[in-house]
Amino acid sequence: MKKPYSNFNATMAIAVASFRSIIRSPSAVVFSLAFPLIFIIVFANIGGSSVTVDVGVAKTTDTLNPVYKILANTKVINLIKDQSTDEMAKNLSKGKIDAIIDIQKNNSRPPFTLHIQYTKASQPKDAILKSLLNSVFYQLNSQGGTAPQPVAEIKETTVSGREYKYIDFLLPGMLGFSLLSSGVFGTAFVFLSLRLTLVIKRFFATPVKKYSIVLGEALARLIFSWIGALFIILVGHYAFGFTLVHGFTTVVNMLILSAIGLIVFMGFGFIISGIAKNESTVPPLSNIITLPQFLLSGTFFATTAFPSWLQGLSNILPLTYLNKAMRDVAFEGAGLGDVTHDLLILGIWFIIVYAVAVKTFKWE
Amino acid sequence: MAKQPIITVKNLVKNYGDFAAVKGISFEVYDGEIFGLLGPNGAGKTTTLEIIETLRNKTSGDVIVDGFSVDHDAAAIKQRIGVQLQAAGYYPNLNLSELIKLFCGLYGIDKTPTEMLEKVALTDKAKSKYKELSGGQKQRFSIATTLINNPKIIFLDEPTTGLDPQARRNLWDLIREIRDSGTTVVITTHYMDEAEELCDRVAFVDGGHIVGIDTPNHFIDELVASGFERKKQVKLANLEDVFINLTGKEWREG
């Protein structure tokens, strides 16, 4: 006779309806796609225009020789001495520093050998450094006067590495911002308006379960956010050279992180929909949640640039950890197992947020 | 024909904190009739309806709908009833077809949007949004959503409020059709001419009590027999008849 009632079908019906509604709502599309893209286009074209060459100084360098002194006095060259050998090697391969020099005093001629490591991640700077060094050595060697052999020689090698571009920093931040605004604003608006217009009450007059309503809405928002994330990643990759270390796997990992982030952020949306009296109180409440994270979670600039008291605040916010995990996955090629620390903190946020949401959420 | 009760309400009480909205209401709705709940605002009509519809918990009393108790079988009742809420909206940004599909999913019923929209003469509005409809069309669409699960009973809460006389008549015809096809209709209204015209039986609710329950004709006869007379001599027609006569019975789409 009658087939049994399917909660799955009811959930899917809500998901389909909600998805249609989201893609037809201008604000959702603007916040999730247009804003992040505009930020990427604007900032990717501004970032990274300084002309100093950062040169790491190896621990084994003899700093008491004339070559070193000349380099230290050259303004364009910024000598870095406070990093460990490992740090330096890492930063070199990312292009955060442009070269590592190691000056050795020789017992034989030439008296000095300058070992220099360049990185493929920073080739434009290499050219600047090479021409600088050449002029330094030309001076030095000609000072030797009549000496037939040069005073110093250059031995250069180039390490292979990936360039850490501003887009590699910016794009994960934009993705986080998109998920944050969609999760908080979108969820808060939808559930508040469904409640105020009695749509949810009408749903309750059907056999649908409460969890189907929440699940269907969440599913629609997740699919929409995934499409948005994929779009941003692909535009970033093909138009701005955003680094995806393991290609497809990296994209999948980023989408999984997106889902985790979105679920946490939706929790804030549920809380706001519960405490907001009407639709005009949603934006201020949402801004209280989203603005600090937008500014302090390393969306545009690394949190290391902040004073330490502000860093303390940054280190509490969930978006900080989503951004960090996202960057590690995208640029360092980390797997999800390598970002468990970040995921753990997002997990703690999940528990806190949903504990509050369960208390404040209103159905009618 | 023996009248079978399809809804039985016994000593229904609903308190909101200290305020008693419903103070021990008892009545029966018979299978296949149009039953009107009448009374001033705040009399407890909507509260009573929502308790029967399983949307609200009662404080005490018994409510049986088509053999199922609201206490234990809310899910079974929801499958058997259709509910139109006063002033309820619909999912934003969706057209009528998509809304019907959504409700089909919510009820777990396979029906095509066209099939449902045909019943309320809205097939040409299939691609319109709910908010683009006229008042009468909105009400007819709401009624369409209540019919999706082939309910035994539908509940209409003030379906004709704010409609013009033509749209009201059009809706009455629709409600009669629904009754004639075997669905029991429970309706609330503030228009007594409507209740007189449409309802097989009516109950008057005031201050949380039922103060009378009977057929409209019987109520009127009783009042007349008690010696009541209208202050102004009743004419054979009223102004609404004039309105319909002058502007035609044809209902205009919004």
Image: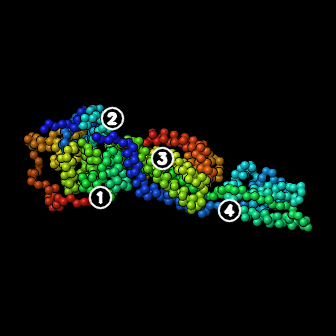
Q: Quadrant of the C terminus of chain A?
A: top left
Q: Are marks 4 and 3 in contact (CB under 8 Å)?
A: no
Colour scheme shown: rainbow
From the viewer's side, name the closer residue of A263 and A353: A263
Residue A345: x and y in percent read: 57, 42
Position above or below: B14 against B156 = above
Q: What residue type is labelled 3?
A: Met
Marks 1, 3: nearer the viewer = 1
* Residue A50 - label: 4
Confirm whether circles 1 and 3 share one chain.
no
**Which residue in the structure is indicated by mark 3?**
A266
**Which residue in the structure is indicated by mark 2?**
B18
Q: Which amino acid does label 2 sit on?
A: Asp
Quarter assignment of residue A45: bottom right
> In the figure, is residue B101 to the left or right of A320?
left
Disc 1 and disc 4: Cα gap in Å? 61 Å
Density class for disc 3 (Cα within 10 Å; few <14, some 14-19, many ≥20) is: many
Q: Which residue is drawn at 46% across and 44% down?
A: A271
Residue situated furthest right in the rendering: A146
Query: Element type at marker 4?
Result: loop
Confirm whether circles 4 and 2 share one chain.
no
Query: Element type at marker 2?
Result: loop
> In the figure, is residue B5 to the left or right of A342?
left
Marks 4, 2: nearer the viewer = 4
Disc 1 and disc 3: Cα gap in Å? 35 Å
Residue B180: x and y in percent read: 18, 47
From the viewer's side, name the closer residue of A109 and B89: A109
Query: Element type at marker 3?
Result: helix
From the viewer's side, name the closer residue of A62 and A82: A62
